[in-house]
Image: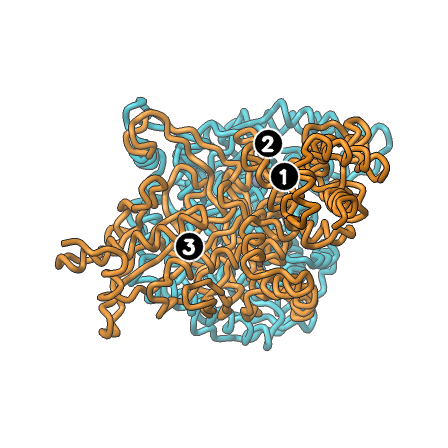
Chain colours: A cyan, B orange
């Protein structure tokens, strides 16, 4: 048993009593102690809570109780999900030291399944960003190259997997925040169908786009975690009252003969790094070898997806983030018993929010203003409908759609931090999935020849047909593993002090 | 020269618009499971959802939707097959999310009407008030601003916030403009709110207690010069919280606006506050500096799409309309108009009906509840039904009808029951309040009375029948009021040869 094992292997070892949950948890904390000073994947470690949870699982196992498949396996939780009495900052000063009085539904499900929550991972403030540089608590570093970004907003979750600090993680994906970090760290990330996983306790950035999902080092691990967190939740009215298809069975099937796989013409070409396109095409060749039929498809409205996204997401965030006003929780600045409530609210929001968050609040406030609403928010909603139609048309001709996950490999920390538009372009291939509310997965498909950094392969499946992306992802992963001879993370340089 | 009400109306024609907010009496809040009880300790009925804590999400209370559909159906509205909530964005400390979740351009009920009957010098008149929309929203928390002179947030030393009210379901009922009410505008406004309140009460969807704020009314009023056909600028008087205040607010605004216009000033489009003491309004926030609420569809909630079958079931379950019920009862009980109105105004119609349903005579039931019992209740500033139960009153009336109690004795029984001396029969026993029905006992008293006033007795013998009154009074006194006066009169006149 090693911390480099996959989650399902750890689960098997726990089940065979080769290792206890407490030992496994401690091993991960040792790794975190060794490498996280360099990686900075975590914002908070709940060692006490995690070990208590691990002890509980060990006790139950010893008593012969029936346990969930992932019981005792550690996990890193993105700091945007509430966990009772554990600080939840969303990477923002405005929530520094806030301890929620309740568990998010995802956390409740994880706890019920005996998954050990090691701590909270770093992220772009309120999930706004593609590099984790917008965290108020400093950036996370990509374990492949510490001078590079781990993607964002969920850079902490993906980096923790690539650095073997945790075998599983939870991310949230509004425009690519699970998939793009997975792509640039050589890990797997899945954005489930919108409504497939409860948003209760996910601190909202953009309610109609946000979705929590599993992050892991293999497709099977992601599927196992997906099954734990999915399901209808009466506390979330947008959650879908329909069972998740069997994604674990789909992953294990490894047979995609005759499947129709659509390549989206619009998600390639200009702006895409050469090495990214090459690795993507090599993966397509593998799919052909496995017997899939490749169809080139056009989704003409994807061109407007990024523009529409940057109206809808900021509009919703301008309203969602209004509650951070110092009155009931979080930071309070300037309360000298003289200043008015309004002044204190203003000062708090000025001091508590970072630049990118303020930029988007202003953008959204403007887009929703009377006189501009129709031209901006209204038009963006129309584009959203057109994007859905593009997907409907495409899925009438094929089973899944594929594209590179991100146009480039991991860039240098600081490289794009003063150019928001360049930063936004990172999500150009991931955003359409959120706009349509469908499922999307990123898995590694090789290392770009220019920089030897991982490239992500995106698979998109229709709403509530999440099993299809697992089916294709599982088969492709197996083919690539046998081609490479070892997991992609074994090509990464070893971190100082790492096991 | 300033205009009074009558002279103002010679020159100007008022146009009304009424917005009524009703707190529903659901057990839980609009978007969470918290209790809605009135008067609980501050901040004890809260949770992550109604406190707007990060990560929390709303879920629509199905009961609130049902109540709102019932209201819409009772007001002859059409029920939208698809309606949505929106967010109304503005910052205020008692607004947990700094937006209010409210229906906006896609309300659940539209295009209804309510007939309002008012009493005038020219007889009863009916005005059809058209309803534009009925929609759902959530209430805000409550702020108490401490210190400062105005009780408003500006100038206060500090503010206390209670979020128990935050998220309580509210229904807003908005009329279309109500034209051509002329001098009856104040009465139509009052009559509308009263009729609406009766309907809401009959639907059992709200406590409709204006004094506790579970029914609040905003009065919109504008004036146009007679014959001009041009609508004037309107003012909006907020939170008028009694029927009488609604009437006074309209009267006050007609006079205020007419005088402004007459002196060449403009009416400002603004929110105004009603002042109970003076019946005047004072300006609040001006609409010109009004905030832009940046409404947009609430992404955390799916649209409300009530099933057609459900709506039809609700339609079938609607109770009898209050106005129709009133007509039916008035006919059945043979009550004159004036007494009927008195009963309705005193809000005793239900109580009288319940008493009648227990077998009491309708006329007696009405006169006891509106007379003696209401008088005592008024003295003590309580409700008549707080003093005595319907069944006690029905029992007392039954004894009167059987001749076992006189009205005078019955008053003592009522007094005893109110004083918590026991049930009517216990009070009768304790106070020995039985009617003296033994003729020989009465004859003894009659003889005694005649002996004490022989001249009066002679007058009666001589045919002066009215003179008998004094003798009857004396007999009643001698029997301690326990005799049946009619029987005494009969015996006395016979005894004196009449
Ligand atoms: Zn609540």
Mark drawn on residue A313:
3
Regarding residue B281, the answer to whether it shows in the image is yes
Label 2 neighbour load within 10 Å: few <14, some 14-19, many 20+: some
**Looking at the image, which is closer to me, B3 or A124?**
B3
Marks 3 and 2 on same chain: yes
Residue hosting label 1: A107
For residue B69, which quarter of the picture?
A: bottom right
**Looking at the image, which is closer to me, B144 or A471?**
B144
Comes first in the chain, label 3 or label 2: 2
Q: Position of residue A163 (x, y in %)?
A: 54, 36
Cα distance in 3D space between marks 3 and 2: 27 Å
Label 3 neighbour load within 10 Å: few <14, some 14-19, many 20+: many
SS for callout 2: loop
Comes first in the chain, label 2 or label 1: 2
For label 2, being within 8 Å of ligand 1 is answered no
Regarding residue B397, the answer to whether it shows in the image is no
SS for callout 3: helix
Comes first in the chain, label 3 or label 1: 1
Q: Position of residue B132 (x, y in %)?
A: 45, 67
Q: Residue at x 34, y 45 (%)?
A: B274
Q: Quadrant of ligand 1?
A: top right
Residue hosting label 2: A84
Chain identifier of the residue bearing label 1 in the image? A
- Disc tally is 3
Question: Quick one: quadrant of the N terminus of chain B?
Answer: bottom left
Marks 3 and 1 on same chain: yes
Q: Residue at x 53, y 36 (%)?
A: B164
Cα distance in 3D space between marks 2 and 1: 9 Å
């Amino acid at each position: 048993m090693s911390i480099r094992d996959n989650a399902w292997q750890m689960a098997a070892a726990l089940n065979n009593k080769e290792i206890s949950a407490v030992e496994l948890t401690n091993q991960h904390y040792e790794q975190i102690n060794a490498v996280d000073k360099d990686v900075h994947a975590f914002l908070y470690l709940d060692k006490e809570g995690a070990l208590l949870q691990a002890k509980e699982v060990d006790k139950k196992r010893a008593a012969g109780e029936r346990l969930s498949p992932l019981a005792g396996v550690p996990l890193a939780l993105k700091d945007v999900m509430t966990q009772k009495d554990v600080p939840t900052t969303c990477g923002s000063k405005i929530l520094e030291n806030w301890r929620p009085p309740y568990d998010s539904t995802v956390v409740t499900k994880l706890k019920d399944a005996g998954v050990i929550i090691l701590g909270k991972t770093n992220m772009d403030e309120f999930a706004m960003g593609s590099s984790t540089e917008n965290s108020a608590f400093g950036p996370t570093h990509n374990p492949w190259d510490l001078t590079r970004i781990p993607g964002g907003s969920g850079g902490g979750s993906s980096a923790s997997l690539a650095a073997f600090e945790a075998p599983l993680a939870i991310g949230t994906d509004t425009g690519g925040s699970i998939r793009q970090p997975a792509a640039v760290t050589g890990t797997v990330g899945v954005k489930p169908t919108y409504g497939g996983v409860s948003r209760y306790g996910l601190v909202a950035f953009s309610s109609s786009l946000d979705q929590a999902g599993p992050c892991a080092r293999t497709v099977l691990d992601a599927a196992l975690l997906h099954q734990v967190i999915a399901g209808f939740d009466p506390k979330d009215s947008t959650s879908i009252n329909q069972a998740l298809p069997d994604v674990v069975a789909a992953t294990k099937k490894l047979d995609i003969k005759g499947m129709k796989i659509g390549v989206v013409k619009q998600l390639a070409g200009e702006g895409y790094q050469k090495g990214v396109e090459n690795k993507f095409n090599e993966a397509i060749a593998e799919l052909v070898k496995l017997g899939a039929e490749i169809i080139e498809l056009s989704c003409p409205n994807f061109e407007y997806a990024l523009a529409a996204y940057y109206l809808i997401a900021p509009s919703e965030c301008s309203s969602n983030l209004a509650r951070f006003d110092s009155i009931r929780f979080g930071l309070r600045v300037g309360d000298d018993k003289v200043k008015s409530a309004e002044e204190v609210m203003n000062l708090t929001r000025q001091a508590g929010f970072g630049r990118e968050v303020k930029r988007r609040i202003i953008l959204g406030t403007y887009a929703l203003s009377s006189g501009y609403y129709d031209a901006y928010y209204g038009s963006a909603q129309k584009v959203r409908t057109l994007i859905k139609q593009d997907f409907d048309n495409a899925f009438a001709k094929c089973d899944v759609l594929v594209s590179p996950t991100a146009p480039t490999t991991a860039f240098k920390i600081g490289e794009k931090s003063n150019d928001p538009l360049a930063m936004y372009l990172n999500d150009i291939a991931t955003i359409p999935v959120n706009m349509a509310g469908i499922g999307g997965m990123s898995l590694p498909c090789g290392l770009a020849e220019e920089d030897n950094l991982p490239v992500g392969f995106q698979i998109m499946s229709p709403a509530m047909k999440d099993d299809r992306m697992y089916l294709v992802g599982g088969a492709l992963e197996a083919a690539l593993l046998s081609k490479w001879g070892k997991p992609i993370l074994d090509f990464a340089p070893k971190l100082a002090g790492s096991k | 020269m300033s205009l009074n009400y009558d002279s103002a109306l010679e020159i100007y024609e008022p146009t009304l618009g009424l917005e009524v907010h009703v707190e529903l009496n659901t057990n839980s809040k609009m978007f969470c499971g918290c209790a809605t009880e009135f008067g609980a300790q501050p901040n004890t009925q809260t949770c992550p959802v109604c406190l707007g804590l990060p990560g929390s999400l709303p879920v629509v209370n199905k009961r609130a939707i049902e109540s709102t559909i019932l209201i819409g159906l009772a007001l002859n509205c059409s029920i939208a097959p698809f309606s949505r909530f929106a967010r109304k964005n503005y910052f205020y400390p008692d607004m947990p999310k700094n937006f209010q979740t409210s229906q906006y351009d896609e309300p659940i009920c539209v295009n209804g009407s309510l007939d309002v009957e008012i009493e005038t010098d020219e007889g009863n008149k009916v005005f059809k008030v058209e309803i534009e929309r009925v929609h759902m929203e959530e209430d805000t928390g409550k702020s108490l601003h401490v210190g400062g002179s105005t009780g408003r947030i500006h100038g206060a030393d500090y503010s206390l916030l209670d979020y128990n009210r935050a998220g309580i379901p509210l229904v807003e009922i908005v009329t279309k403009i109500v034209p051509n009410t002329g001098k009856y505008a104040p009465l139509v406004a009052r009559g509308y709110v009263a009729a609406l309140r009766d309907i809401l009460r009959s639907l059992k969807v709200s406590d409709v207690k204006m004094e506790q704020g579970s029914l609040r009314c905003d009065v919109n009023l504008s004036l146009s010069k007679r014959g001009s056909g041009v609508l004037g600028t309107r003012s909006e008087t907020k939170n008028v919280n009694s029927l009488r205040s609604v009437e006074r607010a309209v009267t006050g605004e007609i006079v205020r606006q007419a005088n402004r216009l007459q002196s060449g000033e403009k009416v400002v489009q603004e929110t105004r506050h009603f002042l109970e003491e003076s019946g005047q309004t004072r300006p609040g926030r001006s609409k010109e500096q009004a905030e832009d609420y940046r409404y947009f569809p609430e992404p955390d909630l799916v649209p409300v799409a009530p099933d057609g079958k459900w709506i039809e079931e609700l339609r079938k379950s609607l109770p009898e309309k209050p106005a129709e019920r009133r007509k039916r009862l008035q006919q059945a009980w043979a009550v004159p108009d004036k007494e009927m109105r008195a009963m309705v105004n005193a809000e005793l119609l239900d109580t009288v009906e319940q008493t009648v349903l227990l077998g009491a005579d309708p006329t007696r039931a009405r006169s006891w509840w509106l007379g003696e019992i209401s008088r005592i209740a008024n003295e003590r500033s309580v409700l008549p039904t707080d003093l005595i139960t319907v069944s006690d009153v029905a029992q007392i009336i039954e004894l009167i009808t059987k001749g076992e109690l006189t009205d005078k004795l019955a008053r003592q029984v009522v007094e005893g029951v109110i004083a918590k001396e026991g049930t009517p029969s216990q009070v009768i026993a304790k106070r020995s309040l039985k009617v003296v029905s033994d003729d020989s006992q009465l004859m003894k008293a009659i003889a005694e009375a005649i002996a004490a006033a022989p001249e009066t007795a002679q007058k009666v013998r001589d045919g002066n029948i009215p003179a008998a009154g004094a003798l009857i009074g004396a007999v009643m006194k001698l029997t301690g009021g326990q005799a049946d006066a009619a029987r005494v009169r009969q015996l006395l006149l016979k005894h004196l040869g009449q």
